[in-house]
Image (cartoon, rainbow, N blue to C red):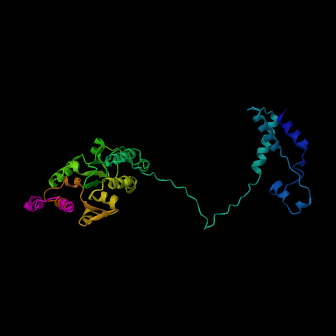
Amino acid sequence: MCLKNLVARKCSRGQGRKVAQFPPRSKEKRPAGGLLNSAIAPGAASREICRVIRPVDVLLEFLEAERARGITHVHLDEDAREGLRGLQSRTKLRAPTSILVEPPSPSAEIFVPTIQAPTLLIEGSTRIEQLDSLRRQAENWAPARSLGSLRETMVFATGNPEARVMLVGEAPGYQEEKEREPFVGPAGQKLNDILTTMGISREEVYLSNIVKFRPSTPRQTTNNRKPTPEEMEACMPFVRAEIGIVKPECIIALGETAAEGLLGLTGTVISMRGPWHDFEGTPVRVTHHPSNLLTSDKSNPVKRQVWEDMLTVMEKLGLPISDRQRGFFSSKS
């Protein structure tokens, strides 16, 4: 059956319902708003309101029925196409309906969904097992990975899980990323020399970094950069958990970036060193990062300041200090 004839037939029959006849457009002008305004105009309640079957409703009903039967295409003759074109042109000329949307009141609560941060799960009965569980979780730590500013290789901590002293740096560098161990580059060798002068071996202490991934830069080779506050915040749960597992008697923060991430301090090492700080009940000493000793000559005060801080740590731990150690710089001044 021709689509146009089908529409006409259903409109004329009304399928048992009251049908409003559509007068020719040339003989009657509809008020603005069309049939909707006519239905709700004053006095409308006093007369019978007929349910109107529009040609487009019949067309949609027919197409839905055909689709239910599995028909995907229907044939349109030229008359049907001309009718659809006329319907489209009338739709374009129809005035748009304005919808007033009231803004929410100032007291209205707006729900903003929050992303729940993952929780570290410390497993194991020994400190070694517990630290190993942290290492596994750090590999795919979502808060750090989702930043998109850190490199792929994770560099965890190393050292004695029962160490009396814990040393914390800022982030792994080129050599640390390559060997997947903190403080193994030139700065790490300088740190080993300092520990040896103190009478402590590298294996006796616990070495870690605030950030567990090397911060990335464009076209990065061997160059490194300081981690951002967001990067440090993303990895701080691990440092806090490490401190809780190892339970060191004191912590040495190496450089202002480590002090910022660990203690929330800002400024230079000169302004931070001197007094003992506190991290959740554990004493913290701030000193220069060993990388600052690589370019300093013998007259540079940085070397003396680092050694003074190490002597203070030795006193805190009750380690023996020889006259030679105490006067290490006095004989060179």
Is residue 132 visible in the rendered image? The answer is: yes
Q: Which quadrant holds residue 39?
A: bottom right
Is residue 254 visible in the rendered image? The answer is: no
Q: Residue at x 68, y 61 (%)?
A: 101
Q: How many marks?
A: 0
141 in the magenta segment: no
Looking at the figure, which quarter contains the N terminus?
top right
Looking at the figure, which quarter contains the C terminus?
bottom left
Q: Residue at x 76, y 50 (%)?
A: 93
Q: Position of residue 329 (x, y in %)?
A: 11, 60
Q: Position of residue 298 (x, y in %)?
A: 13, 57
**Region in magenta:** 308-333
Q: Residue at x 89, y 46 (%)?
A: 17
Q: Residue at x 70, y 61 (%)?
A: 100
Is 248 in front, or is 274?
248
Q: Which quadrant holds residue 174?
A: top left
Magenta: predominant secondary structure element? helix
- In the depicted structure, whether residue 123 falls above or below residue 73: below
Q: Position of residue 30 (x, y in %)?
A: 85, 55
- In the depicted structure, whether residue 136 falls above or below residue 39: above
Q: Position of residue 327 (x, y in %)?
A: 10, 61
Residue furthest to the left: 331
329 in the magenta segment: yes
Q: Is residue 328 left or right of residue 210?
A: left
- In the depicted structure, whether residue 188 falls above or below residue 103: above
Is 216 in front, or is 91?
216
Q: Is residue 159 left or right of residue 63?
A: left
